[in-house]
């Protein structure tokens, strides 16, 4: 079964024209070291989970965790360990795939850029660029 508009596994899908701004900014700690996969397309994919602390006053009192995927990530990402703190800018993507029980989906953040949080000047510049993207009118 094919779902119209759904990305196929192993293929990068970045819409060239989109009238919705899809920018995600996260700061958190890696809950596990990044894992690397070589996709059938030849793309190199790093996957990892980022855990953000509980938001004060949200009533839940527990941390949130988000799955991240980074195509052709820089080499330094492979050297990160669990607990490393990052500032990440990317976009939300929902991908569909076939599993043993049928069609499944996963919502994740596709990383466009990231910096270790300890590099405050680089993190601030990254956040500034992300904010500027949100202020631009859609194409």
Image (cartoon, rainbow, N blue to C red):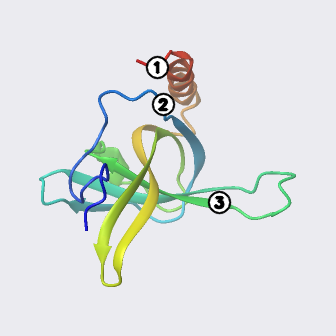
| 130 displayed left or right of 95 | right
Which part of the image, by quadrant, shows the C terminus? top left
Mark 2 vs mark 1, CA separation in Å: 7 Å
Q: Nearer the viewer, residue 45 or 86?
A: 45
Above or below residue 125? Residue 54 is: below
For marks 2 and 3 on the same chain, the one whose residue lies earlier in the sequence: 2
Residue depicted at x 39% and y 29%: 18
Rendered location of residue 20, percent (x, y): 48, 30
Front disc: 2 or 3: 2
Residue 122 position, x and y percent, is 51, 27
Residue 138, labelled with which disc? 1
Q: Which mark is residue 20?
A: 2
State the image quarter where residue 76 is shown.
top left
Q: Nearer the viewer, residue 27 or 59?
A: 59
Vertical arrangement, residue 40 with respect to residue 130, above or below: below
Front position in the image: 4 or 118: 4
Q: Earlier in the sequence, mark 2 or mark 1?
A: 2
Q: Is residue 53 above or below residue 137?
A: below
Q: Is residue 105 above or below residue 132?
A: below
Any mark on residue 64, and which?
3
Residue furthest to the bottom in view is 100
């Amino acid at each position: 079964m094919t779902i119209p508009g759904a990305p196929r596994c192993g293929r990068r899908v970045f819409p060239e024209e989109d009238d919705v701004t899809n920018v995600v900014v996260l700061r958190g700690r890696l809950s596990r070291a990044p894992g690397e996969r070589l996709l059938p397309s030849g793309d190199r994919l790093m996957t990892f989970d980022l855990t953000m602390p509980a938001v004060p006053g949200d009533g839940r009192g527990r941390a949130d965790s988000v799955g991240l995927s980074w195509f052709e990530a820089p080499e330094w990402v492979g050297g990160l360990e669990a607990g490393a703190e990052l500032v990440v800018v990317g976009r939300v993507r929902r991908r569909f795939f076939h599993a043993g029980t049928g069609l499944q989906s996963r919502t994740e953040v596709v990383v466009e850029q990231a910096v270790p949080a300890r590099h405050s000047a680089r993190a601030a510049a990254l956040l500034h660029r992300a904010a500027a993207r949100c202020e631009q009118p859609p194409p």
